[in-house]
Image (cartoon, rainbow, N blue to C red):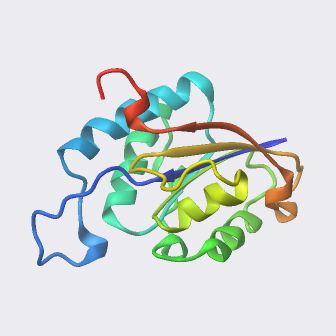
């Protein structure tokens, strides 16, 4: 059994309209929400082996909060171009390429793809995965090359407004 968590990046800033989309950082709310969501997830899923964010600054910053919460090294964070504004197929390829020794992985990406993934996990679950929303699934496989959505069981769907004081 493997664990997989899909996270939409935390709320990003639009303060500087001259920044390229890849370079937009988190805004104040994103910086507040990401560490809270990381702590919330760790209470439920105590170990993460690997975090793979897209190359966008906002996903890397979101991943950094989870890295700190889980005490992961920089070698356990692998930004990838493949998850930047890509479709579900890119996520499949990323998952299929994981080493079988990895038991729990987090993919930090973008909408609309994460909302589409939510639909594949459980149709009707949500119309929109909000910023810093997380979809945690258990996958009934021993090898990531065997991943498919028909082998997942939803363990949790969480987002910042669920937490008190949001």
* Residue at image coords 38%, 50%: 131
* Residue at image coords 52%, 55%: 127
Q: Position of residue 59 (x, y in %)?
A: 39, 58
* Residue at image coords 63%, 61%: 117
Quarter of the view holding residue 94: bottom right
| Residue nearest the observer in this picture, 61 or 90 | 90
Q: Position of residue 13 (x, y in %)?
A: 19, 59
* Residue at image coords 36%, 40%: 34
Which quarter of the rendered picture does the C terminus lie within?
A: top left
* Left or right position of 13 against 104: left
Which quarter of the rendered picture does the N terminus lie within?
A: top right
* Left or right position of 122 against 147: left
| Residue nearest the observer in this picture, 88 or 79 | 88
| Residue nearest the observer in this picture, 8 or 47 | 8
Q: Is residue 153 above or below residue 45?
A: below
Quarter of the view holding residue 159: top left
Q: Position of residue 41 (x, y in %)?
A: 53, 31
């Amino acid at each position: 059994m493997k664990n997989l968590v899909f996270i939409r990046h935390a709320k990003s800033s639009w303060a500087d309209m001259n920044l390229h989309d890849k370079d937009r950082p988190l805004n104040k709310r994103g910086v507040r929400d990401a560490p809270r969501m990381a702590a919330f997830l760790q209470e439920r899923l105590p170990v993460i082996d690997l975090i793979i964010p897209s190359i966008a600054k906002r996903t890397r910053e979101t991943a950094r909060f989870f890295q700190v919460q889980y005490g992961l090294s920089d070698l356990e964070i692998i930004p990838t171009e493949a998850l930047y504004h890509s479709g579900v197929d890119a996520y499949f390829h990323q998952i299929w390429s994981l080493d079988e020794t990895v038991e729990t992985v987090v993919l930090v990406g973008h909408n609309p793809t994460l909302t589409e993934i939510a639909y594949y996990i459980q149709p009707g679950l949500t119309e929109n995965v909000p910023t810093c929303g997380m979809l945690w699934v258990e996958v009934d496989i021993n090898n990531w090359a065997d991943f498919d959505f028909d082998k997942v069981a939803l363990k949790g769907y969480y987002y910042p407004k669920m937490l008190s004081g949001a």
